[in-house]
Amino acid sequence: MNLYTQPMLREDALKDKVAIVTGGGSGLGKAMTKYFLQLGAKVVITSRNLEKLQVTAKELEEETGGKVLCVACDVRNWDEVEAMKEAALKEFGKIDILLNNAAGNFISPTERLTHSAFDSILDIVLKGTKNCTLSIGKHWIDSKNSGTVLNIVTTYAWTGSAYVVPSACAKAGILAMTRSLAVEWGKYNIRFNAIAPGPFPTKGAWDRLLPGNMKDQFDLAKKNPLKRVGEHQELANLAAYLVSDFSSFVNGEVVTIDGGEWLQGAGEFNMLEDIPQEMWDTLEAMIKAKKSN
């Protein structure tokens, strides 16, 4: 049995905590929500699709015995975010954790994107994260309560990436927000951290990004140094640790969990991985021959 597919923390690690997970109805948000519930948290899940949230909530409550509150919320809209916060406080009396997970993306040559398509990604990812962070952060400060914010970014937040320019811009902004507010709001006992996940395929997101047989043509496992993709539990384990009190001295950190994928693309000579052993033998012989001359 691979331990990385197993829960990592003790079962009461998030006991009595209240977490908000944006985009919590599906994919990685759902996986993290499930583990938070298993660890004793009560969770508010949000997205624009209330019906999908309700199906997820019923499933997770039955699996974990935990309590899930569904709130339809478009994170781009400040008034809806404020209403979502108030609904969480009315139901559970407090908020301890904010997980900014809602996202959107296009894979496209940038010149093919309309200005409104570009805006839609910035609005969901950067503006949405800002709205939730400001709304809940101000509540914590006004009520003199501590809090923890976990943001989901990407490795191309610091490298940039062609063909996902709106997402790269938005995620870079979230990365700057994470590090900036970790310092500015530390005095209020509010922590900020981020996770930069690599390939953790989810049916919805990957089907939209790589439709048809493109997923087979771009086999993400093959280009990863560990020759596999991530298991959802691995990400959930890391997220649960970073929002738990066990990480109370971790602030302003961005943890990459991608099997070394982004480093493989960054190293100048990493493409030499494709050279067969026989060619290395030939190259070595040529080098030795030059030295002996």
Image (cartoon, rainbow, N blue to C red):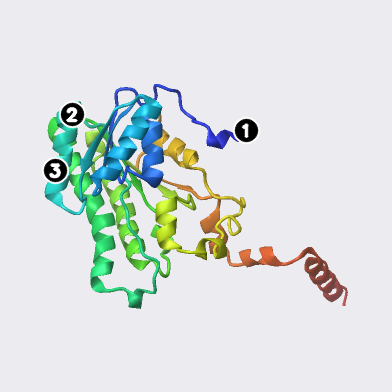
Question: Dot 2, how many residues are within 10 Å of its Cα: few (below 14), some (14-19), or many (20+)?
Answer: few
**Front-most of 85 and 31?**
31
The amino acid at mark 2 is Glu
Decide which of tag 1 and tag 2 comes sooner along the chain.
1
Q: Are marks 3 and 2 in contact (CB under 8 Å)?
A: no
Q: CA distance from mark 3 to mark 1?
A: 44 Å
Question: In the rendered image, which quarter contains the C terminus?
Answer: bottom right
Counting from the top left corner in percent of width and height, residue 38 is at 40, 27
**Front-most of 235 and 245?**
235
Q: CA distance from mark 1 to mark 2?
A: 39 Å
Question: Dot 1, how many residues are within 10 Å of its Cα: few (below 14), some (14-19), or many (20+)?
Answer: few
Counting from the top left corner in percent of width and height, residue 41 is at 32, 27
Counting from the top left corner in percent of width and height, residue 102 is at 30, 50
The amino acid at mark 1 is Met
Q: Which secondary structure, mark 2?
A: helix
Could you say which disc has been placed on residue 82 in the image?
A: 3
Picture residue at 21% right of the left edge, 40% below the top: 71
Residue under numbered circle 1: 1
Q: Report whether 100 appears left or right of 239.
A: left
Residue 4: tell me if it is visible. yes
Exactly how many numbered labels are in the figure? 3
Counting from the top left corner in percent of width and height, residue 257 is at 49, 47
Vertical placement of residue 186 versus 119, above or below = above
Callout in the foreground (3, 2): 2
Picture residue at 53% right of the left edge, 32% below the top: 6
Question: In the rendered image, which quarter contains the N terminus?
Answer: top right
The amino acid at mark 3 is Glu
Decide which of tag 3 and tag 1 comes sooner along the chain.
1
Determine the image quadrant of residue 61: top left
Residue under numbered circle 2: 91
Determine the image quadrant of residue 209: bottom left
